[in-house]
Image (tube, rainbow, N blue to C red):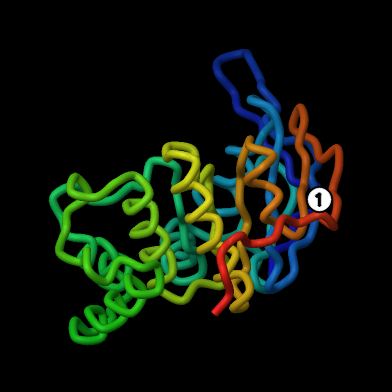
Amino acid sequence: MIKVSHLTKIYKTGEIKVTALNDVSFEIKKGEFVAIMGPSGSGKSTLMHLLGALDTPTKGEYWLDGKLIANMDDDQLAEIRNKNIGFVFQSYNLLPRTSALKNIMVPMMYGDIPKKERIKKAKKYLNKVGLADRMHHTPSQLSGGQQQRVAIARALAMNPNIILADEPTGNIATKQALEIMEILEDLNEQGNTILMITHEEEIAQYAKRIIYLRDGRVVKDKNNGHRRLLTKKKK
């Protein structure tokens, strides 16, 4: 699903060069749930931007579903982002005066999906995250946890190959954070590939694999044999 080979990102400000990522290589297979951890300045956000086709590397290669991303132009990258990647951000990034239902429909509008189908799919994914009764609420009428559920439903709208979650529990209370992680875990069990950035060890324990970054390098890549169990009852 994902292959990065000798990925390097250098930012230049005048004469100053900052190496945010330094020779990073790993692969992520379809259906994996991977957490990326590291201290501030370790390169986590830079890596997420590259994997999300929001930026291009200085050196190295990034392959997504067999396609070499680094060689694509802006239009091709925009299409990859819309059709292949579902984003979940710490700040939700919802349209403030737009209902939950219409927020989920936004990526489908850019994907030229007919309105009737957009509505049907948006309702389906709202139900999937437990917010069928909040479809006409705007973000200001929803709690932080509910807004993040809408963001997850929006990320699923185009049936992406991978979900990229950048600190998905960073702005919400502990109880709501665990509910969000249970949703992501359920999605992974249903076959969705999930790559999540987090600085919280407890949150990372939901992943099946944890990649640790420090100073722009991978310092550890381990399978999570002690993956926490869901506390909710299975139906």
Q: Position of residue 91 (x, y in %)?
A: 38, 41
Q: Position of residue 74 (x, y in %)?
A: 44, 56
Q: Position of residue 129 (x, y in %)?
A: 40, 67
Depth check, front residue: 220 or 46:
220
Q: Position of residue 12 (x, y in %)?
A: 59, 23
For the point 55% across and 61% down, which residue is it? 182
For the point 37% across and 57% down, which residue is it? 151
Question: Relative to 208, is 111 above or below?
Answer: below
Where the C terminus falls, by quadrant? bottom right
Mark 1, secondary structure of its residue: strand
For the point 58% across and 38% down, which residue is it? 45
Where the N terminus falls, by quadrant? bottom right
Question: Relative to 21, is 57 above or below?
Answer: below
* In the displayed structure image, the side of residue 135 where residue 80 appears, left or right: right
Q: Which residue is mark 1?
A: 25
Depth check, front residue: 132 or 191:
132
For the point 21% across and 66% down, which residue is it? 135
Identify which amino acid the numbered label 1 is placed on: Ser
Depth check, front residue: 174 or 104:
174
